[in-house]
Image (spheres, helix red, strand yellow):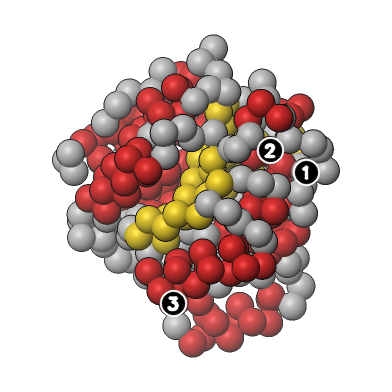
Amino acid sequence: MARLGASSGETPEAGLDPRTCVITGATAGIGRATAFALARDGFHLGLVCRNRAKGEALCDALRSEAGATDVALFVADLGVQADVRRAAGEILAGFPRLDVLLNNAGVFQTRFEETSDGIETTLAVNHLAYFLLTGLLQERLLASAPARIVSVASDAHRFARLDLDDLEFRSRPFRAMRVYGTSKLLNVMWNAELAQRLEGSGVTANCLHPGGVNTGLGDQNGAILAWVGGLVKRFLRSPDKGAETSVHLASAPRLADVSGRYFADCRERRPSTAARDAAAQARLWNLSEALVSGSA
């Protein structure tokens, strides 16, 4: 892996048009709403989706409903590192420039499961896919500078209990919210370290809390969770509302030089104390590199 050194309401920078954005996990929820908003803003889109049929349907909808003129589909299971590498190669072959990478895909697991790489699924999809895909697209982002990396995290990171010696919850009880929150804490920590390594390069890295959003996250985990989720969802914001901060970070001109920050409701917020631990951020980076190095 290469080592890394509604819309915002602002008029996009003319110098970046036509801009290209790659979005992961775009077939539902926040990712889908983000894709529509950016398509309407004139972005060329690359969509990384696990399900080909859903991805093709989304591409058709973006063309017919949002006036998208350039949409490309890349099919990959982000829990499989070989798929991430293949998708990255296809993106590099298809896009001579890349203005925005938007890491959005995520899972919520109610029980311990491993990917085909032998890694706990939440860690693999919610953190390592961000880490690996961003690293593989690094040189293209640098060559396209000014460019942006936007990663969807969550305020669930505030409830995590970090143990860098047990990132996969093999030695601790697997409690769904704690596991998910830990993966989101890793997002915030990684983003801070990434921004530091990219300082002065013209590529920014920011992450965000989308708010409690009515999405399909977790629906794959059984009827009981889906039923409970259905009750809770009545009180959640819409995907369009949840996508606003992602769109803001991807396109607002006034954020061109802002990096290493955490946002919610389009405003900067202070992440948890654990997320701001510089020594832990650096150690997480090294651990993440080790977890993806075997898939080269």
Q: Secondary structure at mark 2?
A: helix
Q: Choose the circle earlier in sequence order: 2 or 1.
A: 1
Relative to 110, is 14 on the left or the right? right
107 and 41: which is toward the camera: 41
Single out the mark in the foreground, 1 or 3. 1
Q: Choose the circle earlier in sequence order: 1 or 3.
A: 1
- Looking at the image, which residue sits at the far right? 9
Q: Quadrant of residue 6?
A: bottom right
Q: Mark 2 to mark 1: distance in Å?
A: 7 Å
**Which label sits on residue 251?**
2
Q: Quadrant of residue 122?
A: bottom left
Give the image location of residue 81, x and y in percent. 26, 49
Single out the mark in the foreground, 3 or 2. 2
Q: Mark 1 to mark 3: distance in Å?
A: 34 Å
- Residue bearing mark 3: 221
Neighbourhood count class around disc 2 (C-alpha, 10 Å): few under 14, some 14–19, many 20 upward: many
Give the image location of residue 84, x and y in percent. 31, 49
Relative to 276, is 52 on the left or the right? left
- How many numbered marks, from 0 up? 3
Amino acid on which disc 3 is placed: Asn
Amino acid on which disc 1 is placed: Ser
Q: Choose the circle earlier in sequence order: 3 or 2.
A: 3
Residue at 30% in and 66% down = 113
Q: Secondary structure at mark 1?
A: loop
- Residue bearing mark 1: 8
